[in-house]
Image: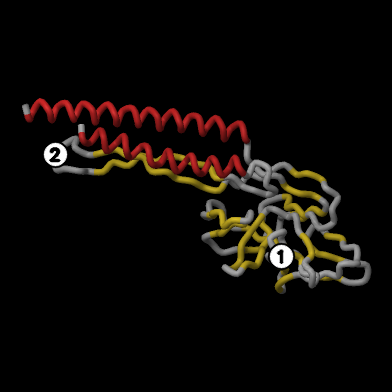
Amino acid sequence: MVNGIRASAAGMRPAMLAQEILANNLANASTSGFRQDRIAFQQLYTERSTLPGAGVASLQLVSRIDPRPGVLEVTDRPLDLAIDGDGYFAVSTPDGERYTRAGHFVLSSDGTLTTPQGFPVLSEGGPLTLPGDVSVSVASDGTLRGEERTYGRVRVVRFEPNTPMRHAGAGLLIADGDAEAAENARVLQGVIEGPNVSPVQAMVEMITLLRHFEMNQKALTTQDETLGQLLSWVRA
């Protein structure tokens, strides 16, 4: 019975963590370039005793960034860029290089191409600087050209399949792997990629997890009350 209480309690915590992940997905259902976290549960079996059958089965939450692209939206804004294919824009932050699919870029006061949060967008030679009074066109390989000169090439990178990635805030991602040039990706000008979040799917998953949590909560309460009654009989 004690093992049953442990198992019920162990099933509640990953459900709570999963709710937080799904809530974050739902909160970013209108965030450009946001890639949702997908969740799964892995069952573990831990031996608590040398007696046969005395182990406890528990659930462990596993989450990964969903690599599927979002819907492309035409904005006709010259500094809105999107990636068609496998790749990410490289961005410089105080904590190191980060990656994003959100291509809503702006010019800072000194002409540096940045994210709305002020993080410089990287080229192959460092941050990109553009004059604010010149019309800029962007080629499919990410090269930015003005009327009389070329200003650089937006750095688009990719990672090996199944490379672990996690959110770093402000629409940025951290990758636990080495970045390489995304040779087959195309850069689109005047286009923004939307999030790959389905609000309906997120809501359905949240309701399913809530039912799972309530089931374990009820089982835990019932087992606790039964154990209390058993102990009171033993003492009597």
Identify the disc placed on residue 5. Answer: none
Q: Tag 1 or tag 2, which sits nearer the N-term? A: 2
Q: Quadrant of residue 27?
A: top right
Give the quarter of the figure containing the N terminus: top left
Q: Which residue is drawn at 80% across and 64% down?
A: 143
Which label lies toward us, 2 or 1? 1
How many other residues sit within 10 Å of disc 2, few (<14), some (14-19) or many (≥20)? few
Identify the disc placed on residue 121. Answer: 1
Give the quarter of the figure containing the C terminus: top left
Q: Work out how far the residue at label 2 is from the one at label 1, CA to CA, in angstroms.
A: 60 Å
Three-letter amino acid code at the position of disc 1: Val
**Mark 2, residue position:** 51
Q: Quadrant of residue 158?
A: bottom right
Q: Residue at x 72, y 42 (%)?
A: 71
How many other residues sit within 10 Å of disc 1, few (<14), some (14-19) or many (≥20)? many
Task: Using the rendered image of the protein, determine whether residue 152 is visible from the camera's viewpoint.
Answer: no
Q: Residue at x 41, y 30 (%)?
A: 212
Q: Is residue 37 left or right of residue 122?
A: left
Asked whether 176 or 183 is in front, the reply is 176
Q: Position of residue 99 (x, y in %)?
A: 63, 59
Task: Using the rendered image of the protein, determine whether residue 24 is visible from the camera's viewpoint.
Answer: yes
Q: Which residue is drawn at 38% across and 43% down?
A: 60
Asked whether 172 or 146 is in front, the reply is 172
Q: Is residue 220 left or right of residue 61?
A: left
Q: Considering only vertical position in the picture, is 50 above or below 224?
A: below
Colour mode?
A: secondary structure
Asked whether 11 or 51 is in front, the reply is 11
Q: In this view, does 218 lie to the left or right of 67?
A: left
- Which residue is at the far right? 147
Three-letter amino acid code at the position of disc 2: Leu
Q: Considering only vertical position in the picture, is 72 above or below 98?
A: above
Q: Quadrant of residue 234?
A: top left
